Image (tube, helix red, strand yellow):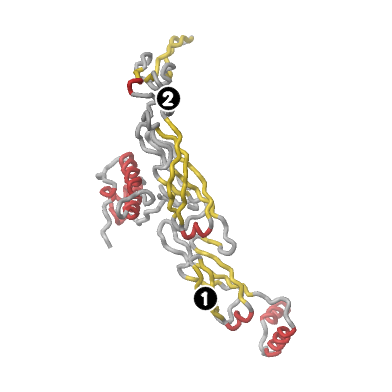
Amino acid sequence: MAEKRDYYEVLGLTKGASADDIKKAYRSLAKKYHPDVSQEKDAEAKFKEVQEAYDTLNDPNKKAQYDQFGHQSQQGDPFGGFGGGGFGGFDDIINSFFGGGRTQRREKNEGDDINMRMTIDFMEAVLGTKKAVDVEITEDCRHCHGSGAESSKDIHTCTRCHGSGYINVDQRTMFGTMRTQQPCPTCGGKGQTIDNKCHVCSGQGRVRNKKHVDVKIPAGVDNEMTLRVPGYGHGGKNNAEAGDLYITFRVRAHKMFKRNGTDIILDIPVTFTQAALGDKIEVPTIYGNVELTIPSGIQSGTSLRLKDKGTSDVRTGKKGDQYVNVVIETPKNLSSEEKKLFEQLKNLENPRKKSSWDKFKEFFTN
């Protein structure tokens, strides 16, 4: 196994880096290596490495332990953000996917996040899938680069506030003159005035556009999990970082399969004959049919396990199992021949051997 790289080295930082430096490095590298958009070689592996480093260094307690003990203090959970029923860590991408706490933006020019809900089928959730998503975003106008002016020559420093965007206002009160600061009414607090507005954005500096992304949904997502897709939120101002896209999932129920965490549950009907004599039957799983041995004498309600036939844990990738619950069917509308056969079977039963019904009655009569 390859030796794990130092987390600071992974993010291109030195030990002692600030929380802001860690966040900025992570956002930059997450966008670079995100498997849905990156053309880099081994992008998925690099993305997981970056995510693992960030999950540790972004948590003050984990960071303190790592700084003291190194990798010995880590449990190696690169997807430690899928919580709350949910897809976290991508914390960032799958957050608690993905409900957990969202990272707070520290720079006012960074773009806002976009939140959306998506309904997917049961099989898409347990096996994973890709979904094409179109989001409407607001971003800087490409013609004026967010300035709102038709050209740079049309932009002038506001003569009233002298570029500060604010003016001082003196008010007389019973306690004397009070000075307050207010946005400049001439430039609207921008510090600049424009002669000719941009013909594309009408001077707003921002435009609405559609953005397309193919979202890779990992196997194992469940209801209310939230997947974070970095960089697909609203655009930042003045070339600042874009926001992120958060997708919260709703999973449609399946007609036959049920789910308990990573385990899959399936009820199967078995005849009296199969239960008494045993049999080999084809059983559906989420991966296709498999052969299952029904042991002779099996009782209704018995659960048989199919190892590794469940869905995956979104954080570890470890698969659950499938549990097959045996339901013995009582035959109805017997033919005359079938009735005769059951009568013969009844007569063949050892009269000396107490039936389960006899034992049940004795419990209440003694």
What number of labels is visible? 2
The answer to whether 34 appears left or right of 293 in the picture is: left
Q: Which residue is mark 1?
A: 292
Q: Position of residue 357 (x, y in %)?
A: 69, 80
Q: Is residue 181 above or below residue 32?
A: above
- Label 2 CA crowd tier, 10 Å (few <14, some 14–19, many 20+): some
Q: Position of residue 7 (x, y in %)?
A: 29, 50
**Residue at far front of view:** 199
The C terminus is located in which quarter? bottom right
**Which residue shows up at 51% across the image and 60% down it?**
123
Label of residue 203 in the image: 2
Q: Is residue 196 above or below residue 248?
A: above
Q: Position of residue 256 (x, y in %)?
A: 58, 64
Q: Quote the CA–CA distance across marks 2 and 1.
A: 69 Å
Q: Is residue 30 visible?
A: yes
- The front one of 233 and 310 is 233
| SS at circle 2 | loop
Q: Amino acid at mark 2?
A: Gly
Circle nearer the N terminus (2, 1): 2
- The front one of 355 and 342 is 342
Mark 2 touching mark 1, by CB under 8 A? no
- Residue 232, by quadrant, is top left
The N terminus is located in which quarter? bottom left
| SS at circle 1 | strand
Q: Position of residue 275 (x, y in %)?
A: 60, 79
Q: Is residue 105 above or below residue 346?
A: above
